Image (spheres, grey):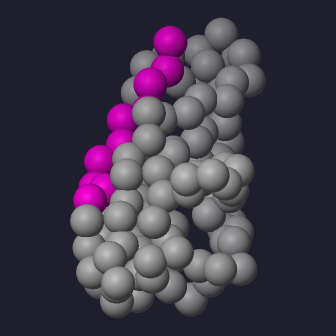
Amino acid sequence: QVQLVESGGGLVQAGGSLRLSCAASGSIFSIVAMGWYRQAPGKERELVAVITSGGSTNYAGSVKGRFTISRDNAKNTVYLQMNTLKPEDTAVYYCNAKLYSTIRELLEVWGQGTLVTVSS
């Protein structure tokens, strides 16, 4: 079994910053990529940012230049630094990991989600 535990969500004023963290634990052999998705009320879940084991990153156009994804491979942890937050960034943010388990099974795992609310 593999678990993702997220932290760092909360309420912030527009223009402020938040940092999300997500730690993976359990029967992990190797992690291929970790990322963040978000889902606003009434909208579909969308990719925010992803980082591979090699450090390559990809961002949604709406967050480029404001959000930074990083990763601590030794801790199996991914971070999302969110700056210059806007009310439209309000959503539940989900951590995602694509990894190989200890029995070499390719898995996709989701966290429970953390709410980010940006007030205007």
Residue 115 placement (x, y as % from top left): 37, 52
Image side of residue 46 versus residue 93, left or right:
right
Quarter residue 117 falls in: bottom left
Task: Please determine whether, in this image, residue 8 is positioned above or below residue 111.
Answer: below
* Residue 104 visible in image: yes
Q: Toward which corner of the image does residue 6 lie, by quadrant? A: top left
- Residue 108 falls in image quadrant: top right
> Start and end of the magenta stretch?
1-10
Residue at image position (55%, 53%) is 41
In this view, the residue farthest toward the front is 42
Asked if 39 appears above or below 66 in the picture, the reply is above
Number of residue marks: 0
Q: Is residue 21 in sight in this rendering?
A: no
Left or right position of 5 against 105: left
Where is residue 47? Give x, y as percent. 68, 58
Q: Is residue 7 magenta?
A: yes
**Residue 97 is one of the magenta-drawn residues:** no
User: Is residue 14 found left or right of 68 in the rendered image?
Assistant: left
Query: Is 100 placed above or below 38 here?
Result: above
Q: Residue at x 65, y 80 (%)?
A: 62
- Residue at 56% x, 89% y is 65
Q: Main secondary structure of the magenta part?
A: strand
Q: Identify the image quadrant of the C terminus.
A: bottom left
**Residue at image point 50% right, 12% down:** 1
Q: Position of residue 79 (x, y in %)?
A: 41, 59
Position of residue 8 relative to residue 87, above or below, is: above
Q: Nearer the viewer, residue 118 or 108?
A: 118
Residue 107: where, in percent of width, then height? Answer: 69, 24
